[in-house]
Image (tube, coloured by chain):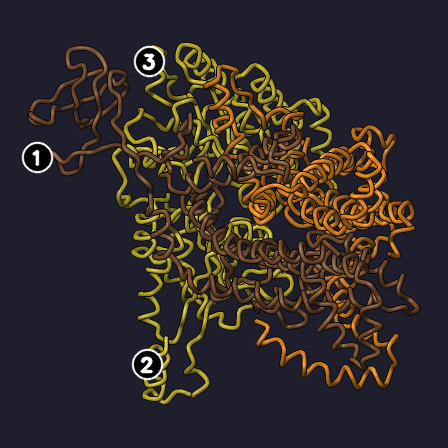
Chain colours: A orange, B brown, C yellow
């Protein structure tokens, strides 16, 4: 691999060196950024800009030229509620059900997942045998596609699934997991933690291993209790990594879609319908395709995410600049 | 045996197991069950026939009923053991069954038809892996073509993404320039946009650029991921600036610093990102589904989902295909995880 | 492929044709399978290609999801295939290629009759757009063995939904079957029963309408049946959104007494139930409004206007529409024929057991009972929206998120805003 890459890198060095002489070192940063920014511009911001246009136009036409301008009507439709706490009083009740479901889901999922990831990372950071193997074990589900994750757990949890067969056998008796709103929601949280925990464990583990050993040795000399060591040394030193984990987990949590959609379809009723599913169904899968409404909803979600992330960054402002 | 025991009980040097070690190992063993168990179940299920899949209670291993060829019958007959009545304990072959009654014959005397209640019969079964679930796949479509498309997309997109993202991360972590915070915010802002919600505008853009029904239409839009930039940037920050300054003193060009110093030092993070990138592209479904419509461009995931019709799903083929698509990525992971381990270990001690 | 072109070139040169016309016209056919349809088309069309060396048909087998969700977007962007197998018959009308100039109109009208209407934009449209390749009709399967074990008489001809509900409950109580009844989770599936309960589905101007007395009556009954355990909850309450869910697995495992699905399940029942128990097709029960209607349905093959080779597209579809070819495909895919000539001639389904043959015939015999409303609904351009709304809101009523009354209000409002957006 390296044998192929090295000459390529040598060739790139020639124009880069010329640019470095031309621009100076600090402005060269923009050259490093350029490819990424061009791709972001074309495939992330341009679509979002188009989404803004979609959000302000109506009808079910795909092409923007065919869509009449409606101003803020789509936003009005979404926000038309007598009480935001009770989706039944909203014009777009499905949107608000999805919003509340997502809120609860993210709170539980991020909390549980980060907790377990940290616990797993700490255990894996101990001097245990076969550490590489165990690390792989916990990372393995991350490799599965969301649809496969859903498929596996559906086969296990359906009424005639493996878990119920086991419960029947033990005499406890099976439960119709996916027909009960609370259970379906609980299992959605579970499979989403199951599927993504390995990723965050790995990041946290890398963070833990970057903490210099001598800091701990000093703590051992001072006869600090393990809990105190954890709170006073591990956590603060881990906080830059923790920031990555929290920001990513929160954003990905709000964006949860594929695995739960393939798992419960959002049901029973709307018990596990999350915000991206609402957007997907309104704007893409459903009939007619209400692109405008879907685009408006996606912009509202993005706005909330931006606010949440800014709050997180502000809380961690000392660490963000490294 | 004793070696295994000493292997399992080895601990933080002291030789005796502290209670926290017991808890740790307990947790890890539970982890194996929970993380691997479902996947093992998937693999076993992929060797089952449709009838066996629909069965309740499900059985761990795939079974098939024993059959026997008897003179006078065109097809092999299923075998049963009689549980009660006159013929209790006998092995019989069933010729017909209707409404709870079965017509059977004794293998020694295939001429005489006997009528029994169906409840008196217990099927005789043996373990049988339905390997035809797999072999049928290769007959049904151009598996190698799809494998090649998936591989090409995954490899190209991953390399492109690693290069582009690490360049951006380098700029954001090691340079002081006006607008750095702004760019960082843009990167984080991009995180807020899941592909699902921009599917239609993105499709229109890619079509306008002439990348419809081209593998590049899948590769290029995914090449710049905010997650990658964010992850690498947070890691590169921890690389001490003194190393860069020393290199600059030696008149190394910035590109050389990036390529010779930053990239090797970021290996653990890059390895993690490589695994993620491979996994994302390999498992990608919604996006290729809309960009690639001609079978010569199909990826494995598209082929896999073509087993889902409007009203029927071909589960046996779908499960077998799922396992097949899982294998390469598992292999890649086995290979790369070594690098993560060594990478982390070598930088961890500093 | 290479040989193909070579042959074409030689032929073209021989006949002194312009070189431009010599290159084989590639026609892309986007297909999805519920069984072996695409394979059979591929096989049949290879004969067509042999007869027409200047046309090269490429079949792309995709997930049904791609047809339902992506195809309309691709068509709008001008990047669709030339031919596709579709189910949203009326909804995609604006993109269809009118085959009328290329085919024998009389033959098509005679052979496909009323199903041609499903593909048309409205009453004053007389184009020929699609060939209905497989006809389906909804109807019920009953587990005859369970009835016999329970000693309950199976309700006969003209029995109502109430009769069947009562009988199925009695059977389920007397045997170890878990569920008396189930209906697939689909707006299409409940349309038949709803019509039997008096739902009109169209207003006086011919626009789609969901909520009326009959529809509400059926919805109330349906929700009540879920509450008292007559209906298997798993099917409608185990999913969300407008996701499709069937109950074939429960029926095959002998846990379900009465299963309302449709003719497409026959193959699966035949293969999987085997001799585990006896099953029987009992058609669509009657409602209090007197009708005993199922819903017709199925898929058809259409060409798109944006194709570069309209003649080739028409030739391919016309080939598939020929009586002998249609009969062969029908027999091999084991579907009900929409081709009237094939239907009246009777089809010997390939590899089907006696039970399956009887079941398919029973479904075919139920076709005359289909209400004109059901027939019109199947070809209505807004039916996908209506199916989706039905499933979503009815499910919410079943799981208790909405009362039946609220669900009806929501349905009406949903449909109104859908209509407003899709003039």
Which structural element holds mark 2? Answer: helix
Image mark 1: chain: B
Along the polypeptide, which appears first: circle 3 or circle 2?
Answer: 2
Which residue shows up at 46% across the image and 45% down it? C298
The answer to whether C273 appears left or right of B7 in the picture is: left
Residue B71, label in figure? 1
Q: Nearer the viewer, mark 3 or mark 1?
A: 1
Q: Mark 2: few, some, or many residues within 10 Å (few <14, many ≥20)?
A: some
Measured along the vertical axis of the image, is residue B266 above or below residue A88? below
Q: Mark 3: few, some, or many residues within 10 Å (few <14, many ≥20)?
A: few
Q: Can the viewer see residue B106?
A: yes
Which residue shows up at 48% across the image and 59% down it? C30
x%, y% of residue C288?
53, 20
Image mark 2: chain: C
Q: Where is mark 3, residue-wise?
A: C149
**Nearer to me, A173 or B232:** B232
Whether labels 3 and 1 belong to a single chain: the reply is no
x%, y% of residue C4?
35, 77
Which residue shows up at 45% across the image and 43% down it? B313
Q: Nearer the viewer, mark 2 or mark 1?
A: 1
The answer to whether A93 appears left or right of C212 in the picture is: right
The answer to whether B295 appears left or right of A124 in the picture is: left
x%, y% of residue B77?
18, 32
User: Are the residues flagged by discs 3 and 1 in contact, CB closer than 8 Å?
Assistant: no
């Amino acid at each position: 691999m390296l044998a192929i890459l090295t000459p390529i890198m040598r060739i790139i060095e020639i124009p880069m060196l010329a640019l470095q002489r031309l621009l100076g070192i600090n402005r060269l940063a923009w050259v490093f950024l350029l490819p990424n920014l061009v791709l972001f511009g074309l495939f992330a911001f341009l679509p979002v800009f188009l989404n803004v246009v979609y959000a302000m136009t109506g009808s079910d036409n795909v092409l923007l030229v065919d869509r009449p301008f409606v101003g803020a009507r789509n936003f009005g439709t979404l926000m038309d509620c007598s009480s935001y706490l009770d989706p039944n009083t909203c014009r777009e009740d499905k949107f608000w059900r999805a919003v509340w479901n997502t809120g609860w889901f993210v709170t539980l999922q991020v909390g549980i997942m980060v907790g377990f990831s940290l616990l797993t990372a700490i255990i894996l950071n101990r001097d245990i045998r076969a550490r590489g193997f165990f690390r792989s074990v916990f990372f393995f589900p991350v490799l599965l596609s969301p649809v496969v994750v859903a498929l596996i757990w559906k086969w296990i949890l359906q009424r005639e699934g493996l878990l119920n067969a086991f419960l029947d056998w033990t005499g406890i008796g099976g439960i119709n997991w996916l027909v009960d709103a609370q259970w379906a929601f609980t299992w959605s949280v579970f499979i989403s933690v199951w599927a993504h925990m390995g990723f965050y464990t790995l990041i946290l583990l890398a963070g833990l291993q970057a903490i210099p050993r001598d800091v701990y040795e000093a703590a051992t000399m001072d006869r600090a209790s393990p809990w105190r060591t954890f709170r006073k040394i591990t956590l603060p030193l881990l906080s830059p990594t923790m920031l990555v984990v929290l920001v990513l987990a929160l954003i990905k949590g709000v964006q949860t879609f594929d695995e739960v959609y393939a798992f419960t379809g959002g049901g029973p009723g709307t018990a596990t319908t999350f915000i991206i599913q609402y957007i997907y169904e309104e704007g893409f899968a459903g009939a007619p395709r209400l692109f405008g409404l879907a685009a408006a909803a996606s912009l509202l979600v993005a706005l909330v995410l931006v606010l949440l992330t800014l709050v997180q960054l502000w809380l961690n402002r000392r660490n963000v600049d490294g | 045996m004793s070696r295994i025991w000493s292997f399992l009980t080895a601990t933080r040097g002291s030789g005796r197991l502290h209670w926290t070690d017991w808890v740790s190992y307990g947790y890890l063993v539970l982890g194996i069950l929970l993380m691997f168990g479902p996947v093992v179940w998937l693999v076993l299920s992929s060797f089952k026939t449709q009838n066996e899949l629909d069965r309740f209670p499900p059985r761990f291993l795939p079974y098939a009923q024993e059959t026997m060829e008897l003179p006078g019958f065109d097809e092999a007959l299923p075998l049963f053991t009689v549980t009660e009545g006159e013929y209790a304990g006998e092995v019989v072959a069933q010729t017909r069954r209707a409404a709870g009654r079965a017509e059977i014959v004794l293998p020694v005397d295939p001429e005489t038809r006997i009528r029994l209640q169906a409840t008196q019969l217990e099927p005789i079964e043996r373990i049988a892996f339905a390997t035809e679930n797999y072999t049928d796949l290769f007959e049904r479509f151009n598996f190698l073509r799809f494998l090649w498309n998936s591989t090409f997309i995954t490899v190209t997109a991953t390399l492109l993404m690693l290069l582009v993202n690490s360049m951006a991360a380098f700029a954001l972590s090691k340079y002081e320039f006006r607008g750095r915070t702004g760019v960082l915010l843009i990167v984080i802002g991009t995180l807020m946009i899941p592909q699902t919600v921009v599917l239609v505008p993105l499709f229109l853009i890619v079509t306008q650029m002439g990348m419809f029904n081209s593998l590049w239409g899948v590769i290029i839009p995914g090449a710049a991921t905010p997650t990658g930039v964010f992850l690498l940037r947070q890691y590169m920050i921890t690389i001490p600036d003194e190393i860069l300054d020393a290199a600059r003193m030696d008149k190394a060009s910035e590109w050389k610093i990036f390529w010779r110093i930053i990239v090797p030092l970021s290996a653990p993070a890059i390895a993690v990102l490589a695994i993620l990138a491979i996994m994302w592209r390999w498992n990608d479904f919604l996006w290729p589904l809309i960009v690639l419509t001609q079978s010569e461009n199909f990826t494995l995931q598209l082929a896999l989902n073509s087993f889902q019709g409007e009203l029927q799903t071909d589960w046996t083929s779908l499960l077998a295909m799922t396992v097949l698509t899982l294998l390469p990525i598992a292999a890649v992971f086995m290979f790369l995880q070594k690098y993560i381990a060594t990478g982390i270990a070598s930088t961890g001690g500093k | 492929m290479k040989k193909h072109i070579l042959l074409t070139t030689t032929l073209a040169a021989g006949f002194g044709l312009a070189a431009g016309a010599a290159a084989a016209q590639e026609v892309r056919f986007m297909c999805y399978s519920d069984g072996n349809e695409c394979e059979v088309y591929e096989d049949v069309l290879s004969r067509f290609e042999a007869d027409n060396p200047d046309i090269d048909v490429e079949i792309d087998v995709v997930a049904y999801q791609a047809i339902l969700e992506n195809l309309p977007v691709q068509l709008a962007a001008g990047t669709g295939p030339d031919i596709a197998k579709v189910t949203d018959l009326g909804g995609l009308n604006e993109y269809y290629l009118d085959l009328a100039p290329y085919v024998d109109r009389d033959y098509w009208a005679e052979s496909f009759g009323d199903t041609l209407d499903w593909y048309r934009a409205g009453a004053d449209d007389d184009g020929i757009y699609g060939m209905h390749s497989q006809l389906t009709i909804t109807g019920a399967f009953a587990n005859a063995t369970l009835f016999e074990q329970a000693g309950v008489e199976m309700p006969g001809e003209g029995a109502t939904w109430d009769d069947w509900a009562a009988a199925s409950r009695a059977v389920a109580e007397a045997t170890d079957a878990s569920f008396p009844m189930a209906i697939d989770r689909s707006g299409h599936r409940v349309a038949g029963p709803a019509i039997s309960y008096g739902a009109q589905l169209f207003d006086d101007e011919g626009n789609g309408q969901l909520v009326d007395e009959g529809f509400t009556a059926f919805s109330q009954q349906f929700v009540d049946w879920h509450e008292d355990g007559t209906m298997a909850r798993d099917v409608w309450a185990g999913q969300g959104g407008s996701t499709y869910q069937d109950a074939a697995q429960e029926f095959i495992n002998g846990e379900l007494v009465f299963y309302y699905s449709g003719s497409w399940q026959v193959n699966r029942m035949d293969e999987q139930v085997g001799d585990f128990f006896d099953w029987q097709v009992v058609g669509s029960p009657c409602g209090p409004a007197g009708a005993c209607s199922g819903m017709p349905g199925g898929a058809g093959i259409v060409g798109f206007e944006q194709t570069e080779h309209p003649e080739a597209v028409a030739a391919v579809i016309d080939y598939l529409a020929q009586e002998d070819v249609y009969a062969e495909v029908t027999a091999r895919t084991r579907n009900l024929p929409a081709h009237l000539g094939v239907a009246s001639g009777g089809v010997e389904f390939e590899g089907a057991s006696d039970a399956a043959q009887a079941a398919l015939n029973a479904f075919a015999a139920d076709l005359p009972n289909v209400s004109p409303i059901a027939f019109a609904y199947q070809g209505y351009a807004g039916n996908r929206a209506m199916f989706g709304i039905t499933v979503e809101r009815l499910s919410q009523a079943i799981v208790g998120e909405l009362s039946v009354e609220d669900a009806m209000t929501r349905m009406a409002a949903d449909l109104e805003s859908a209509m407003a957006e899709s003039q």
